[in-house]
Image (spheres, rainbow, N blue to C red):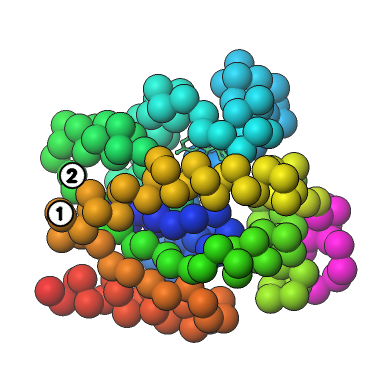
Amino acid sequence: MRLVFLGPPGVGKGTQAERLSKHYRIPHIATGDILRKAMADKTPVGLEAKSFIDAGKLVPDEVIINIIRERLKEPDTKSGYVLDGFPRTLHQAEALSRTLEQRHEEIDRVLYFELGEEELVRRIAGRRSCPSCQKIYHTTFNPPPKEGSCTCGTALIQRKDDRPETVKERLAVYRNETSPLIEYYKKQGRLSQIDANESVDAVAERVQDAILQNKSS
Ligand code: AMP
């Protein structure tokens, strides 16, 4: 099963993708996580990406497309994957489509998570991340068992780009560059819309429904 999770920052894509990937035992491929790891490891890609990420801008298409091409060569992607945070521009979507064509594969479903901006800002403000295992929490909706600490024992942090001044820019980038993908995938008949204004469990049920519906159609 090959899935794309599409939606604005803070909508809960990462949390849902992580659950789904465990359920179906397919890898959760999050370009944001890959870039944050590259930044922490100070690789050339990480160093190049840092200024874009910190400013809430998109990393250049060619950098991301290469990352995904390489990642999809790994053997664990044979039975499928959840792409989270990629594609984010039309150019990336077209590159993905060409890569899959060469592999005689297709995206089975694109799940588009929808939520109003006010709620997105609220969710991002409370988001805390584990810099070690990348697990995501929310101070109110999904608190860690021990305050301020991940289940892996690492102290949780607020991502630099989750601070209010950068969030505004990320939402604008989403509106301008990523939201045209909704129409792109709708036209292909691959899009399922998910109302994300519910609890994590309720949204997870909607995700399952959308996938099962697709399997039976
Ligand atoms: P995320 O964790 O998905 O919110 O991504 C964090 C940041 O990484 C984004 O604000 C971008 O700067 C960068 N990024 C992640 N995925 C992409 C992508 N597909 N294209 C360009 N930049 C990306």
Figure label count: 2
Q: Secondary structure at mark 1?
A: loop
* Residue for badge 1: 188
Residue at point 87% right, 68% down?
A: 147
Horizontal side of 169 relative to 178 (left or right) equals right
Q: Position of residue 199 (x, y in %)?
A: 57, 81
- Front in this rendered view, residue 95 or 34: 95
Q: Does residue 14 sit above or below 169 in this rendering?
A: below
Q: Secondary structure at mark 2?
A: loop
Horizontal side of 3 relative to 32 (left or right) equals left
The label nearer to you, 2 versus 1, is: 1
Q: Earlier in the sequence, mark 2 or mark 1?
A: 2
Q: Main secondary structure of the magenta part?
A: loop
Residue at point 12% right, 74% down?
A: 217
* Residue for badge 2: 105
Q: Amino acid at mark 2?
A: Glu
Q: Which mark is residue 13?
A: none
Magenta part of the protein: which range? 144-156
Task: Indicate the quadrant where residue 161 lies.
Answer: top right
Q: Position of residue 151 (x, y in %)?
A: 77, 63
